[in-house]
Each structure stands twice: as C-alpha cells, then as structure tokens.
Amino acid sequence: MGRSEATTDTTTSTLTNIDTTKRRILVVEDEEALAVGIRDAIEHAGYQVDVALDGNSALELARAGQHDLIVLDLMLPGQSGIDVLKQLRAERHAVRVLVLTALADEEDLVKGFEAGADDYMKKPFSPRELLARVEAQFRRAKMETAPPQMLELPGSIRVDLARLEVHRDGETVPLTPREGDILSYLIQHNDRVVTREDLLLDVWHYQSANVETRTVDIHIVGLRRKVEPEPSKPQLIQTVRGKGYRWYA
Ligand code: CA
C-alpha cells in the first residue's frame, strides 16, 4: 500500500481540513473483530491503515517509521502496549500514540502517559469518537507554525523544542510531541494564566473542554519532571490555584 499523493474532495467527511490520504495509521489491537472495526472506520475516513494483532508485530511495523499515528491497545498478549510504547520512545520514535484502554485504572493511564502516550481513549468507544481523537492528533497546524526554540532554563537545563529534547545533568531526556506542544503553548501565552480548558481546546484540540481534565494535570506533572530544576517545587510551570497554569517568564 503506497502513499497516495492524490488530493481528494473530502467535503462529505467530517475531516474536511485534513488531507487524510497522506496519513498512515498503525492500529494495534489483539481482539481481531475490534481491530477490523477500527481499521474500517479509519480507512473509511480516508487514512491508510496497517493492523498489528500483537506487540511484536506492532514493534516491527512501527520501527519501519511509516506511521503518523499509532492507535495502541494496552492489554496485549506477550508484550503489553506499555512495553511497546516504552521501546519505541527509547528508540526515539516521535510518532504520536493514542492509547486504548479497557481498564478504568488510573495507574494504567499514568503509566501510559509516562511511557509517552499523547492521548487515550477508554473502551468502549464509538467510531465517531475514535475519529475525533485521531483528527485531533493531526490538527496541530497552528502549533507547528511556532518557530523552533531553544530554551535556556534555570539549573542549566536546555530545552530543544524543535528536536523535542531536554538536556539536563549531562543527559538527554526526550519530550513527547504533546509535552512539546504544551510547553510551547505555555510560553506563547506567558502573559496570562492558561486554563486547563485552554489546553484541552488549543493543544488537545477537543471540540469541548467538557472532558476529564485529569489528562492535563498528568501531562503537567510529567513535563515538570523533565524541565523543572526541582520538580517537587515547580517554579517554571506554576500552578495558579483554581485557574490553571502559568509560565514563569
Ligand atoms: Ca486487548
């Protein structure tokens, strides 16, 4: 299946702003019927789709680096979705990852985000919801026009926003694309308090901020761990009680 450069008229689709034909998505789901359902829904929206039914084949396919997004189930036989994700991030794959979880367990979600997930969906979900999340992952045009920046932070911490890397204590710590977006957004709006709602609408691109805001907080915690000189006493990403967050500058 080659990448088609053809432009299609997508006026009948909800994905009108995106040329979906150029996007390739890897779906990792061991429940075959569900995998097929997801594939059909995504393919129907015009994306190109590959399917992996277990962690090993997922890694193999993902390593080829052809995908713009991975829809990754967490509970897989053999290697779990978390294992797959950790391995990809360790190998510096910056592909966006939307995690699927049947577990309401917050612990599991935290692990997913720590391993580098960009977003998650709880099962069961409708094809419509799934497409909205997939689309949200690709609606980042505004963010991507922001000039690449190198930040010099207290504690001799340097952040390379173009390469999504943090250099600290002689180490290089990768940022996820989502963390990079949050950081850029906070910096671009450093003249005011950024609310969780702002982040959900402008960074996550949700249609409404009427969703679990825990997602934002989990990401902020992860980001602080990477960029704050003293993550337990955040000074760069400040919490404004009852309102949101503010960049220190
Ligand atoms: Ca599963």
Image (cartoon, rainbow, N blue to C red):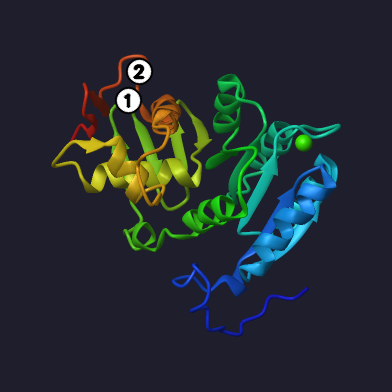
Q: Position of residue 193 (x, y in %)?
A: 18, 36
Q: Position of residue 239 (x, y in %)?
A: 25, 24
Element at badge 2? loop
Q: Nearer the viewer, residue 249 or 129?
A: 129
Choose mark 2 or mark 1, whichever is in front: 2
Q: Amino acid at mark 2?
A: Glu
**Residue at 61% across / 44% down in the picture?**
125
**Residue at 56% across / 39% down in the picture?**
120
Q: Position of residue 195 (x, y in %)?
A: 25, 36
Q: Is residue 35 above or below residue 88?
A: below
Ligand 1 rendered quadrant: top right
Q: Amino acid at mark 1?
A: Gly
Q: Quadrant of the C terminus?
A: top left
Q: Which disc number belongs to residue 247?
A: none
In this orientation, does residue 66 appear? no
Whether residue 27 sits left or right of residue 150 in the image: it is: right
Q: CA distance from mark 2 to mark 1?
A: 9 Å
Whether residue 62 sits left or right of residue 140 in the image: it is: right
Q: Nearer the viewer, residue 75 or 96?
A: 75
Using the rendered view, name the quadrant where residue 80 is placed.
Answer: top right
Q: Which residue matches tag 1? A: 155
Whether residue 118 sits left or right of residue 156 in the image: it is: right
Whether residue 170 sits left or right of residue 185 in the image: it is: right
**Residue at 82% across / 42% down in the picture?**
30
Looking at the image, do the residues carrying marks 2 and 1 touch, with CB atoms under 8 Å apart?
yes
* Count of all numbered marks drawn on residues in the image: 2
Q: Which residue matches tag 2? A: 230
In this orientation, does residue 49 appear? yes
Q: Residues within 10 Å of mark 1 (few under 14, many from 20)?
A: few
Element at badge 1? loop
Q: Quadrant of the N terminus?
A: bottom right
